Image: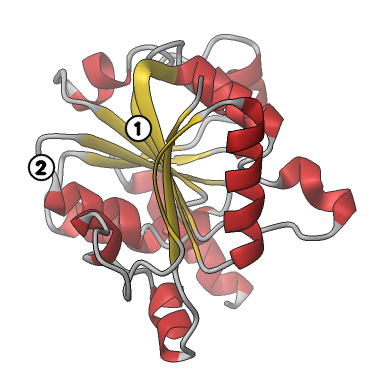
Amino acid sequence: MGSKNKLKRFRENETFQNVVQPNRDELTNGKFPLKGKWNETFFKNNAPLVLELGCGKGEYSVGLAKKFPDKNFIGIDIKGARFWRGAKTAQEENMNNVAFLRAQIELIDFAFAENEVDEIWITFPDPQIKYKRTKHRLTNSDFLKKYKRILKLDGVVNLKTDSEFMHGYTLGLLHGQGHEVVYANNDVYHQEGSPEEVTAIQTFYESQYLELGKPITYIKFKIK
């Protein structure tokens, strides 16, 4: 994407009512006004709150929001030029149950209060296979602690990935730390029992992976 195109998208994001872009200081100094008040202040209802981490173009957040109009969805990514697409679609279709937050995922517990979130989706994250990159892996122990902090007691996390490594690593960690694996499937399109929201919504990259014959895996779990 050219820099002109990026700038245009950044400018357009600033006009969207469904995009929230706090700076790092605003998040970390404890003055972020939506923390603990997303439903009350932003969505103005009391529906379950669902996050998609590393939402990319926002297709999954928008797809889930269409499928579950009685829930509120927030796609989170640091790359605003990417989620511009999802934000624009949601704006054009007058969807009032989906928003986008431009922030680093490691700051998630500064953006949401304890027990504020009902569910988390992690869709096709970078598996960060190199050992030096493990601190950025979105299902490592540190991230799980952050998710536990913001999730309600019975809150769930969904991981959907094309990476066998990420699937295996996460399952091993969950079992090793005594978390509850509610459901796991290492090929959701070719094995029975997959939840409909896992197979009914596809991202752009997911459809490419499927064309290449790559199995898509899924884990639903609770952090103890």
Question: Which percent across, then down, holds residue 7?
Answer: 54, 62
Q: Please indicate, yes or no, whether residue 106 appears anywhere in the rendered image.
A: no
Q: Residue furthest right?
A: 132
Q: Is residue 219 above or below residue 191?
A: above
Camera-side residue of 211 and 175: 175
Report the residue at 47% width, 19% height from top.
150
Report the residue at 57% width, 77% height from top.
1
SS label for mark 2: loop
Q: Which of the two marks, 2 or 1, is nearer to us in this view?
A: 1
Question: Which percent across, then down, holds residue 160?
Answer: 44, 57
Camera-side residue of 63 and 81: 63
Report the residue at 38% width, 31% height from top.
156
Looking at marks 2 and 1 on the same chain, the residue that comes earlier in the sequence is marked by 2
Q: Is residue 119 above or below residue 138?
A: above
Q: Is residue 70 left or right of residue 103?
A: left
Q: Residues within 10 Å of mark 2 (few under 14, many from 20)?
A: some
Q: Please indicate, yes or no, whether residue 219 appears anywhere in the rendered image.
A: yes
Q: Is residue 30 above or below residue 110?
A: above
Question: Which percent across, then down, holds residue 56?
Answer: 48, 59
Q: Is residue 41 left or right of residue 58?
A: left
Question: Which percent across, then down, holds residue 101?
Answer: 44, 39
Camera-side residue of 162 and 93: 162
Mark 2 lies on residue = 69
Mark 1 lies on residue = 119
Q: Amino acid at mark 2?
A: Pro
- In 3D space, how far apart are the residues under numbered discs 2 and 1 (Cα atoms)? 15 Å
